[in-house]
Image (cartoon, coloured by chain):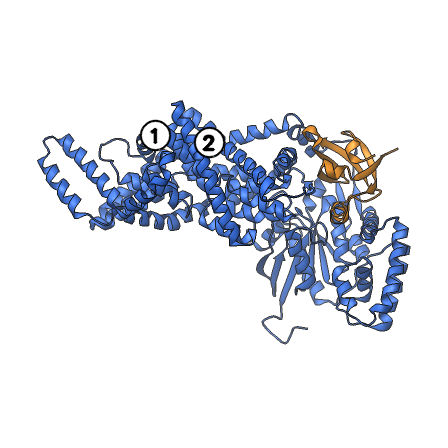
């Protein structure tokens, strides 16, 4: 599943970044790397933007970008 | 090395690098007592700034580079950092990292370690780390990275001297290779290429190991360099094979992603060895989590933000009104005192009715400006700014704007000039141009005096704060609609991604707020004392000359023949009116008057608006000069507020406010706009665009207001 399909409060692990080139590099530089844990903190009205926490960093992503991040539930 | 020249012998040039919002500018401020602008969001520094200071026997030049998450050239500000680090001369890198978030910050450090430059790491915000129970073994970390690490805090000034001492020591020692260690697979490939390079000895400014790493991770500069070497044809097949190995190992087709993973695992290792977190409770909510629960609540978040804004404008008006009477009487008193010392009639009038009336009209609003600036400073320094960008992104997106546009737009409420510059955080040129075009619709601090003046004159005191709030909100709404129109016509294109870091909430230091507000207020006062004073003098001169002897003679006889004292007063007023409309400014006003008649303006308002193209405060000072030379002989309250209430109909006042809200920003801002947009052509478009919008909206507002009354 991708990040957009997660609920608030979910803790998941990144399995794949489907973004291309520049955006991918951008996400990587924010610490969104395969195998990293993240938590969904908040969603803005209508799930237009999602706030996630990667390690200690809080990030805001728009739904288009969130849907490019493949994740898997943590055991 | 450089000992031959005594002037440069002890000179150290430092590149200050780090991720956004780790306190680079603040660190410089603490070290050198300079005053760079700081805030709590990514992208406060958008341009490189040089700071010079002396320490011990050394002369330091610190280049404060915009924060960057990686050595990329994604946005304009990142390009500034990237190009400086790669192509310019400097002696040493100070890499500033946030001690409370090392794993992310050291990603950039790992990239810097392959540049082949001397380096020192400042483990900044160590005071915050201590509070959060984070313990860092700096000695061990220095050893593991092969780069000296020093704990610092820009707030408590801890470790600043040690940082400088270490910098001097590293500067004087020979370069040592940092210890960046990769996985076995990657190390093997690096060795292969390094061995090949060592054998053929191409000329490189960097160490061969770094060259090998950089060529493997597809670094453009290294690629270009080696591409021109004769060994390239032999190196290429080896390189392709090595890259394939690494990609296979990482299960990706993107070598840069593979290296990002390599860096990440190296750093995880270093952090695990050197950082201890005491009493870590993973389920415990941080303060930021708790505040965010309320402030970015999906339902209440936006109303809360609007409430804050409403409160700010209420305060701006209510608190700001308190000292106004004192300031007003001060300038009346000053006018009398100064007037009495000047014998020459013309000079006295110029100083009292021109300079003092004009400057006084502008200075009157200093309290309002101060409150507005405090509000903006709080928004910037607490970390709330990024939250609002998060909340509003969905809404902004509908209008074709990027959520991050919010940051330059809010800055625009203070002054358009820094707002135009901060639009650089937007990566896409189309997004950036679109944002540049609508920044002017966010009413800047200099327009506040006009609003306060009119709101106070035409509305009840209890309503004036709300009116002020309404003006700012409608300005913003007009801006959004304008953005939508531009997006559909001039700036068509695909939407850009939105990825933004949300900083931790921080309690802003009083010193910082105080400093920001004082600096901005002094700038406002300085402008009032120089630019506005000169403009007032010019307006006064244009309104007094040429002297018309005929009118003077005509009224002299009429007044002499007047039967009652009232009639004489009435005639005097009439004379002044006639003289004013025959003055240069009256003549100019009458030429442009027909253009503005549909909006219900008299020529004095026209002139005030046109003069406002120089600076928005001049609108108020011009009104001050033009109405102070009018009829103030009737013994009534002489304040400008009463004068405009008496002379300007309500509907015209509304149309006037609409024009001030929407027309071209001041000349200085337009110049910066042209520079940021890349061409004066755009400034011309901006002029046409804002003028058309202002005219149509003001006309509509005037018609509606007339029909309602």
* Viewer-proximal residue among B118 and B458: B458
Q: Which residue is mark 1?
A: B649
Measured as percent of width and height from the top left, residue B96 is found at 69, 52
Relative to residue B473, is residue B633 drawn left or right? left
User: Does the image show residue B37?
Assistant: no
User: Does the image show residue A31?
Assistant: yes
Where is residue B91, by image quadrant? bottom right
Among the chains, which one is orange? A
Please tell me whether mark 1 sits on a helix, a strand or a loop. Answer: loop
Identity of the residue drawn at 70% across and 40% down: B131
Identity of the residue drawn at 8% across and 36% down: B561
Q: Return the disc, 2 or 1, that comes first in the chain's sequence.
A: 2
Quadrant of the image containing the C terminus of chain B: top left
- Chain hosting mark 1: B
Measured as percent of width and height from the top left, residue B521 is found at 46, 44
Q: Which residue is mark 2?
A: B468
Measured as percent of width and height from the top left, residue B134 is found at 75, 42
Where is residue B706, by image quadrant? top left
- Image colour for chain B is blue
Number of other residues with Cα within 10 Å of mark 1, as a class: few under 14, some 14 to 19, many 20 or more: some
Separation of disc 2 and disc 1 at Cα? 19 Å
| Label disc, if present, on residue B132 of the rendered structure | none
Measured as percent of width and height from the top left, residue B364 is found at 38, 39
- Chain hosting mark 2: B
């Amino acid at each position: 599943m991708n990040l957009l399909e997660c609920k608030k409060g979910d803790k998941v692990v990144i399995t794949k970044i489907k973004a291309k080139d520049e955006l991918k590099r951008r996400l990587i530089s924010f610490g969104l790397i395969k195998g990293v844990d993240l938590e969904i903190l908040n969603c803005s009205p209508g799930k237009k933007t999602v706030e996630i926490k990667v390690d200690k960093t809080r990030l805001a992503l728009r739904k288009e970008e969130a849907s490019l991040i493949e994740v898997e539930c943590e055991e | 090395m450089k000992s031959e020249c005594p002037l440069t012998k002890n000179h150290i040039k430092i590149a200050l690098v780090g991720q956004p919002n780790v306190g680079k500018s603040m660190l410089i401020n603490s070290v050198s007592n300079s005053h760079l602008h700081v805030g709590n969001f990514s992208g406060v520094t958008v341009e490189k700034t040089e700071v010079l200071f002396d320490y011990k026997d050394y002369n330091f030049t610190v280049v404060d580079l915009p924060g960057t998450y990686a050595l990329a050239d994604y946005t304009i500000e990142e390009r500034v950092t990237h190009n400086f680090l790669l192509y310019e001369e400097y002696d040493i890198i100070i890499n500033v990292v946030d001690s409370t978030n090392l794993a992310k910050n050291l990603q950039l450090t790992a990239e810097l370690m392959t540049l082949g430059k001397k380096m020192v790491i400042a483990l900044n915000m160590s005071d915050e780390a201590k509070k959060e129970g984070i313990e860092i073994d700096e000695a061990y970390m220095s050893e593991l990275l092969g780069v000296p690490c020093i704990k610092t805090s820009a707030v408590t000034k801890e470790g600043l001297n040690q940082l400088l001492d270490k910098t001097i020591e590293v500067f004087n020692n020979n370069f040592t290779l940092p210890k960046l260690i990769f996985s076995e697979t990657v190390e093997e490939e690096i060795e292969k290429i390094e061995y090949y390079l060592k054998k053929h000895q191409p000329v490189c400014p960097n160490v061969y190991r770094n060259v090998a790493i950089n060529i493997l991770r597809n670094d453009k500069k290294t690629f270009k360099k080696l591409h021109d070497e004769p060994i390239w044809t032999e190196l290429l097949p080896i390189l392709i094979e090595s890259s394939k190995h690494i990609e296979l190992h990482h299960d990706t087709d993107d070598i840069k992603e593979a290296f990002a993973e390599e860096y990440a695992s190296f750093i995880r290792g270093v952090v695990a060895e050197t950082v201890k977190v005491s009493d870590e409770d993973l389920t415990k909510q941080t303060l930021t989590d708790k505040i965010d629960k309320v402030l970015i609540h999906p339902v209440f978040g936006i109303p809360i933000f609007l409430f804050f804004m409403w409160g700010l404008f209420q305060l701006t008006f209510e608190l700001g009104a308190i000292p106004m009477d004192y300031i007003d009487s001060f300038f009346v008193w000053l006018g009398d005192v100064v007037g009495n010392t000047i014998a020459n009639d013309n000079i006295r009038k110029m100083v009292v009715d021109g300079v003092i009336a004009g400057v006084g009209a502008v200075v009157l609003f200093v309290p309002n400006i101060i409150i507005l600036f405090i509000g903006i400073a709080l928004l910037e320094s607490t970390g709330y700014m990024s939250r609002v960008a998060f909340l509003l992104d969905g809404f902004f997106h509908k209008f074709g704007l990027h959520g991050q546009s919010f940051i330059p737009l809010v800055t625009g409420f203070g002054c358009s000039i820094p707002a135009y510059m901060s639009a650089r955080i937007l990566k896409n040129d189309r997004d950036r141009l679109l944002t540049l075009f609508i920044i002017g619709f966010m009413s800047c601090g200099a327009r506040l005096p006009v609003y306060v003046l009119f709101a106070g004159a035409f509305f009840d005191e209890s309503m004036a704060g709300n009116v002020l709030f309404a003006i700012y909100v409608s300005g913003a709404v007009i801006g959004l609609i304008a953005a939508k129109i531009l997006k559909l016509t001039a700036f068509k294109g695909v939407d850009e991604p939105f990825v933004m870091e949300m900083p931790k909430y921080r309690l802003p230091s009083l010193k910082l707020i105080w400093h920001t507000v004082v600096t901005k207020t002094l700038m406002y006062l300085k402008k009032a004392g120089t630019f506005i004073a000169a403009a007032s003098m010019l307006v006064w001169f244009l309104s007094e000359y040429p002297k018309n002897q005929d009118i003077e003679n005509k009224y002299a006889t009429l007044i002499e023949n007047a039967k009652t004292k009232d009639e004489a007063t009435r005639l005097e007023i009439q004379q002044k009116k006639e003289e004013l409309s025959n003055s240069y400014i009256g003549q100019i006003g009458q030429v442009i008057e027909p253009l503005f008649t549909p909006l219900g303006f008299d020529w004095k308002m026209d002139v005030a608006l046109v003069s406002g193209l120089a600076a928005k405060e001049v609108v108020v000072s011009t009104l001050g000069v033009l109405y102070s030379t009018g009829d103030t002989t009737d013994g009534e309250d002489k304040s400008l507020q009463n004068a405009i209430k008496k002379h300007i109909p309500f509907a015209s006042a509304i149309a006037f406010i609409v024009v001030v809200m929407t027309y071209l920003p001041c000349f200085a801002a337009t110049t910066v706009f042209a520079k940021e947009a890349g061409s004066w052509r755009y400034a011309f478009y901006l002029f046409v665009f804002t003028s058309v919008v202002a005219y149509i909206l003001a006309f509509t507002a005037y018609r509606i207001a007339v029909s309602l009354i």
